[in-house]
Image (tube, grey):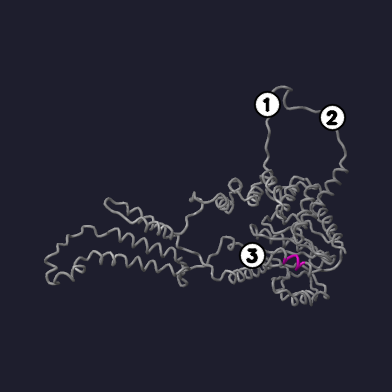
Amino acid sequence: MDFSNFHFLRPTWLLLALLGLLLPLIWQRSRDLQRRLRGNIAPHLLPHLLLTPNDPHRVRPVHLVCALLVLGAIATAGPTWQQDRPDFLENRAPLIIAVDLSPSMDTADVPPTRLTAAKHTLHDLVQRRKGTRTALLVYAGSAHLVLPPTDDPELLDTFIQALGTDLISKSGKDVAAVIEQAKRLLQQSPGTLLLVTDGADVAQLPTLKDDSLQVLVLALGSSPTLKQLASALDAPLGSLTLNDDDLDWVARHAQQHFQNADEQQRLLQWKDAGYWLCWPLLLLALVSVRRGWSLNWGAVLLLGLLLPPTPAEANPFLTLDQQGRWAFEHHHYPEAAARFVDPYWKGIAAYNAADYDLAQTTFSAMNTPQAAFYLGNIHVRRFKFDDAISAYQHALQLQPDFPEASANLALAIALKKDTESAANNTPEVKPDEVKFDKAPGKGQSKAIQTQQANNDALWLQNLTTSPANFLRRKFSLQDQEAKP
């Protein structure tokens, strides 16, 4: 453990430790009868006139108060020697993958084709990044969001393998639109955009530079515009390899950028280690319970105010919203939903707990864009696409710049059309014979409750169309809406 950076976050509290060190001296001085009587009795007579009994107790209450004040002051001052790095920083950096779906990606110079080879590499990449948030964009003459940031590699790979050059009808290579989409997804947080492409639109190159976003270019083929694209974006240029070098290259650049940005944002944030002193403080408090000892309870209460707060789970004096927040941060979503009073957080907790009845009731009583957005998500999961479309449209009325609601609105419209098409084309088949598992009037009926899906992968499996057809329709609708 490196203590070279040891310091205190709140050093002013160390003055209280100085007071604690002076207390035994002050107490001893107050008990010095010779000093008090020196002005009234000749100094050479004092030793013979005073009887000072031997104190069998070496440790007195004042020494306990001294130790408590010193330890409490050190704990409150915030001793630290390492930066505070939350658990999520141990994972890999957030990444946005943008795949070029222009017709040139069907070229076979990278066997079997450029796009197929890219999909194989991306399959390995998302499996390696399991548990880390990754988003998926595609582009040709227009850019489209396939999946917002998710940590589910199976869901990502499902849509990656469904990609094809026939999904976007608009021709071109609109990298500028990809950058705008990526910036909206990251929302000023550190992250990396990975462009998987075989070329660029030369006319766009002078306008592509953006210092707020790190871009990596994973090249397919040998087009000279690839180097021009990397130069215009000031981006590292890599290529597919037969081993894992390309994956290591992406991970190394993304993580380095993320850590550098995080160090700049949290330069003065250090891990407070003062809470470790709670244990010796507790031990001192237990030792103080001795017969014949008395203590000024005002000092004890003052010391209690200086101690670091206890964890929320052990503190019954927290408000219900604070208890709910603790449960939510520890992923105890049903408990959080039960404790929250704040309607928005109660709805969020219920949504994460897959208690969609409670979430719908809670969000329905609110008139905010976020509440309408989550209502739309609930309706989509229940295949109530008309209600979902109305909810997303309401969210966009309240907040026009809401890219997630816009993307999900297009998704709900596409799902509705796919469902209607499947229903219209399904032939009616009547059974030859109907049998029941028990005779009429006998036995008992029992309601069977099924657990509602709590991630996108489960409800997406219920689509009545293939992912490719779904994406094709979705992109077509978005391109039609984007036309002036």
Q: Nearer the viewer, mark 1 or mark 2?
A: 1
Kindly indicate the quadrant of the structure image that contains residue 449: top right
The residue at the point 27 percent across, 59 percent down is: 59
Of the residues shown, which amino acid type is indicated by label 2? Asp
Q: Report x, y in % for residue 240.
A: 73, 68
Q: Which residue is mark 3?
A: 93
Question: In the picture provided, is 43 more to the left or to the right than 395?
Answer: left
* CB within 8 Å, label 1 to label 2: no
- Asked whether 24 or 67 is in front, the reply is 24
Q: Report x, y in % for residue 380.
A: 76, 48
Q: Secondary structure at mark 2?
A: loop
Q: Which residue is mark 2?
A: 432
Mark 1 vs 2, N-terminal side:
2
Kindly indicate the quadrant of the structure image that contains residue 435: top right
* 181 drawn magenta: yes
Tell me if mark 3 has few (under 14), some (14-19) or many (20+) residues whose alpha carbon lies within 10 angstroms of its own: many
* Residue 444 circle label: 1
Mark 1–mark 2 Cα distance, whole angstroms, equals 27 Å
Q: Report x, y in % for residue 140.
A: 82, 65
Provide the residue span drawn in magenta: 178-183
